[in-house]
Image (cartoon, rainbow, N blue to C red):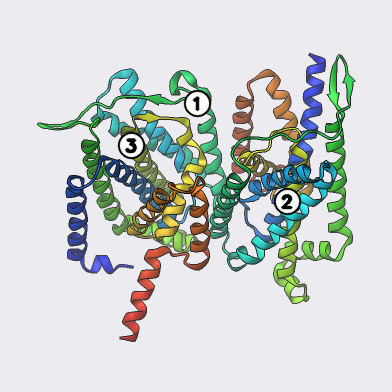
């Protein structure tokens, strides 16, 4: 599990190469693929933020759609109604969902197991109904469209209406978030999350305030899910109540399980595989979720640790026999 | 106004009894496997869709009412035997697995049945007056059938060998194994009965709502609410909660919009979850 950590240089090299590859890729591909990859980056952020609470802390939340949807509304409404720039808007895409995550989490972490799953679903449903009916704020069933302002940082400026500009912007933000999350899960805080997942009772006996740490994980994940929602709205130029529906959280569940929960690279791999599969299947199959469902069921039954888990166990076996 | 309220009360009871059936199925499976079956709403939908095909084929609602639940019960057995059996001791993994099964069933129906909603005509078209309004006799029939089914379930659980085994496994699994009860068989039959109940619920709901591949999604949540409020593992609690909640929602919808009535009952559910996670009628 800590093979990356033993070789920090190896991680830096691979991470750098992947980012470099993604930076030069737009010079060789069509706009169509750039849009696809931009959306892929957004879902990666959504999946790794979900993995922090599920894979690392052991809490199955089907409520992440709530934060994703609110993040989308935040940037859309602030830009549309109040003419706010993208920089403070994106910051609020993290902060406002964090406040919601604090509220939802405050109640939810009191519950465990199935009850936790259900209460997070219920909160997301309430948000979805409110998003659907509060038409004056959210645009109701039609949702809201907007034109994002350019992102400025000193002299540096990115035009987000441009597909390539948007691609680089989302890539940079998601890469940064990946590094931050990596830092978090390797820190002592991350170890506490894992200890709660492994044995909540023991973590409590050691003296950790388990509910508080669960809440911290929930708030961090909520903020990053919100950021993912904000980036998604920047990409689509649209926000709608559909993204608040609890089943949207299912995307993160699928990507994380297929790739490998409890590792950050797992959800990245899972998102890449599932979205590419859908992208390919959509040409000749109306019901792409059918294949997604089958893949999910097969993975859960045969390889609950996901693709990354499979590779790791194979590597271990190789080492043992050598 | 009085006629409006009395219609709302009647509808509340009828819909409550339909919801009680699906909630009983969900609760039965929960009581035994300690797992929330996320595919339960999809099984409800599958029941309604199967009924639509059977009615096209035979022209009889009553034949569909018997065959469709049998079919879904067999699907339930296949799900339990083929998929869930190996992970039954891991509740969270099972939730994710049944979520995947939900996707598969929904999308298969979308492919075969199509995305457009279809109607099932009610086999009884007579109406009778309530105050100055007319009430369809079919709905009374639906309520009546639901009650018969629930009585049947009660007799099954109390009077048959399998019912006794099921109750024994719910009470103490280790002990049941020790006494030689074939626990894996009991799991299989529980899943079959639970799935068939969801399908009965779907067939009975079909003449009231329209049949489409997403019809189970909202109903699944309704069934969650009922099972939690009534108490997980408490079957009688589920029936009471189902009728109570749908009465409150039905009558509430006269005064506020249906979505506000829904938000209101969800907020109550959160309070129940936090204050009495064992349900309102548990010990």
Kindly report which numbered mark, 1 or 3, lies closer to the viewer in this rendering.
1
Q: Where does label 3 land, which residue?
A: A94
Q: Where does label 1 land, which residue?
A: A141
Report in which chain the residue with disc 3 lies: A
Position of residue A320 measured from the top left corner of the image (x, y, whole percent):
34, 83
Q: Which mark is residue B25?
A: 2
Q: Is residue A282 left or right of residue B13?
A: left
Q: Quadrant of the C terminus of chain A?
A: bottom left
Q: Is residue B223 left or right of residue A264?
A: right
- Residue at the image position 37 percent from the left and 58 percent from the top: A192
Decide which of tag 1 and tag 3 comes sooner along the chain.
3
How would you rate the neighbour count of disc 1 (Cα within 10 Å): few for under 14, some for 14-19, many for 20 or more?
Answer: some
Question: Is residue A209 visible from the viewing direction of this image?
Answer: no
> In 3D space, how far apart are the residues under numbered discs 2 and 1 (Cα atoms)?
33 Å
- Residue at the image position 54 percent from the left and 30 percent from the top: A129
Report in which chain the residue with disc 1 lies: A
Question: Is residue B8 visible from the viewing direction of this image?
Answer: yes
Quarter of the rendering containing residue B209: top right
């Amino acid at each position: 599990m800590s093979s990356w950590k033993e070789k920090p240089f190896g991680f830096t090299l691979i991470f750098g190469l992947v980012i470099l590859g993604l930076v030069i890729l737009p010079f060789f591909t069509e706009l169509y693929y750039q849009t696809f990859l931009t959306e892929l980056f957004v879902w990666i952020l959504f999946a790794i933020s979900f993995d922090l609470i599920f894979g690392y802390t052991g809490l199955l939340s089907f409520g992440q759609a709530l934060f994703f949807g609110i993040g989308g509304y935040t940037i859309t409404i602030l830009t549309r109604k109040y003419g706010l720039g993208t920089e403070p808007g994106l910051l609020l895409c993290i902060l406002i969902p964090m406040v919601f995550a604090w509220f939802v989490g405050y109640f939810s972490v009191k519950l465990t197991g199935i009850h936790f799953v259900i209460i997070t679903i219920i909160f997301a449903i309430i948000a979805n109904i409110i998003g659907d009916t509060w038409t004056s704020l959210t645009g109701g069933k039609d949702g809201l469209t907007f034109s994002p302002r350019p992102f400025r940082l000193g002299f540096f400026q990115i035009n987000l209406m441009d597909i390539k500009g948007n691609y680089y912007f989302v890539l940079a933000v998601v890469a940064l978030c990946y590094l931050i999350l990596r830092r978090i899960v390797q820190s002592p805080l991350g170890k506490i999350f894992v200890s709660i997942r492994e044995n909540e009772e023991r973590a409590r006996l050691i003296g950790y305030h388990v509910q508080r740490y669960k809440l911290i994980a929930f708030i961090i994940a909520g903020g990053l899910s919100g950021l993912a929602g904000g980036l998604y709205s920047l990409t689509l130029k649209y926000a709608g109540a559909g993204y608040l529906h609890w089943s949207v959280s299912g995307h993160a569940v699928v990507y994380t399980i297929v790739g490998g929960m409890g590792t950050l690279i797992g959800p990245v791999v899972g998102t890449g595989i599932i979205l590419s599969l859908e992208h390919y299947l959509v040409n000749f199959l109306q019901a792409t979720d059918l294949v997604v469902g089958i893949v999910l069921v097969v993975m859960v039954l045969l390889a609950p640790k996901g693709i990354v888990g499979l590779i790791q166990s194979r590597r271990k076996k190789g080492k043992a026999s050598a | 106004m009085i006629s409006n309220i009395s219609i709302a009360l009647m509808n509340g009871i009828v819909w409550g009894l339909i919801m009680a059936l699906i909630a009983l199925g969900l609760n039965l499976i929960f009581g035994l496997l300690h797992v929330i079956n996320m595919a339960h709403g999809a099984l409800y939908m599958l029941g309604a869709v199967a009924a639509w095909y059977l009615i096209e084929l035979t022209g009889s609602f009553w034949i569909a009412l018997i065959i469709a639940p049998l079919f879904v019960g067999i699907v339930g057995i296949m799900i339990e035997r083929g998929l869930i059996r190996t992970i039954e001791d891991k509740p969270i993994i099972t939730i994710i697995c049944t979520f995947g099964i939900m996707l598969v069933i929904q999308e298969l129906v979308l492919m075969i049945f199509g995305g457009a909603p279809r109607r099932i005509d009610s086999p009884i078209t007579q109406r009778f007056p309530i105050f100055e309004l007319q009430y369809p006799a079919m709905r009374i029939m639906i309520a009546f059938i639901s009650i018969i089914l629930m009585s049947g379930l009660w007799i099954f659980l109390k009077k048959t060998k399998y019912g006794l085994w099921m109750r024994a496994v719910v009470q103490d699994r280790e002990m049941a194994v020790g006494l030689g009860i074939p626990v894996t068989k009991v799991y299989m039959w529980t899943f079959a009965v639970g799935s068939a109940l969801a399908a009965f619920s779907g067939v009975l709901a079909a003449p009231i709502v329209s049949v489409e591949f997403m019809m189970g999604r909202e109903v699944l949540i309704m069934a969650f609410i009922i099972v939690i409020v009534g108490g997980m593992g408490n079957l009688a609690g589920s029936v009471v909660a189902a009728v109570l909640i749908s009465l409150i929602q039905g009558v509430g919808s006269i005064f506020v919009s249906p979505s506000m009535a829904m938000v209101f009952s969800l907020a109550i559910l959160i309070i129940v979850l936090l204050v009495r996670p064992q349900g309102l009628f548990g010990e």
